[in-house]
Amino acid sequence: MTSIDVLFSKDKKSLVSTDLPSPLYHQLYSLIKTNILNGTLHFSEKLPSEDEVAREFDVSRITVKRAMNELANDGLVDRARGKGTHVIYKYTPTPVQAPLVGVLEEIDSIARESVATVFECSMLKPPQAIRTEFGISVSDTLFHLIRTRERVGSVFGYFESWTAGVIVPQNTDIFVRESRHKYFRECGVEFTHTKQTLSAVAADENMADKLAIEVGSPLLHLTRCSYKRENTKEVLVDHLQAFYNPKLFQYQMELNLD
């Protein structure tokens, strides 16, 4: 379903009605504004024509025109004759704040309840993108770890990480049943905060092979960057990319108001 399909969905159409007390143009304006501000209608997306919107919501074209003009006045859309109406608001997701202790406990729990296969465990010179994020020189090395994890015979995740401040352990089998963070703690490496992003990607040939799925299959992609503070400076310590088979793994968080 496209974002326009979402806008024209039955539940959205019910939000624009003569049964409601506010003017129809304002109802339509509020509906489209909400869907722009929450990212459903994204930057540069072309909105349907006034005639299409009028037909879908069973309102007059004058009503649609007024709603669109209000959106333009708010700086959310740009209207140009012959080119139509385009979204010009850039949505930026607001980070969810959650205790770091709870995140680390969840990581340890996943490790205890699964088995890892380690494909690489060494000190390597990282690629340029990783060097830039860590702020290190071309000659510096980081601890590089690649592994998969499985439960009851099914591989659910592929993980690649780069870490500063640790070396290769004498026995790499420690990562089979335990999380990296247990080893990090033993090495004296601590984090003060993490930033993580969830997205969706398609499996490439390497991912498909490791996860025993078809090339192009959808994966849940998590990037987690862990930092420490040195005075007022934020220093990257660990960069993890995780790829999960959504049929075998769901990422859940429970957040409380306090």
Image (tube, rainbow, N blue to C red):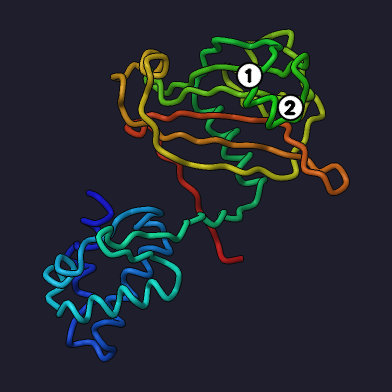
Q: Amino acid at mark 1?
A: Pro
Q: Quadrant location of residue 3?
A: bottom left
Q: Residue at x 38, y 65 (%)?
A: 77
Q: Quadrant of the C terminus?
A: bottom right
> Whole-percent x and y of residue 173?
62, 11
Residue at the disc numbered 1: 127
Q: Residue at x 42, y 30 (%)?
A: 244
Q: Secondary structure at mark 2?
A: helix
Number of on-image labels: 2
> Whole-percent x and y of residue 25?
26, 82
> Whole-percent x and y of residue 46?
29, 56
Query: From the viewer's perspective, is 36 left or right of 12?
Result: right
Residue at the disc numbered 2: 184
Nearer the observer, disc 1 or disc 2? 1
> Whole-percent x and y of residue 2?
25, 50
Q: Residue at x 35, y 64 (%)?
A: 35
Task: Note whether 145 is above or below 17 in the view shown.
Answer: above
Task: Note whether 45 is above or below 151 in the view shown.
Answer: below
Query: From the viewer's perspective, is 100 left or right of 119?
Result: right
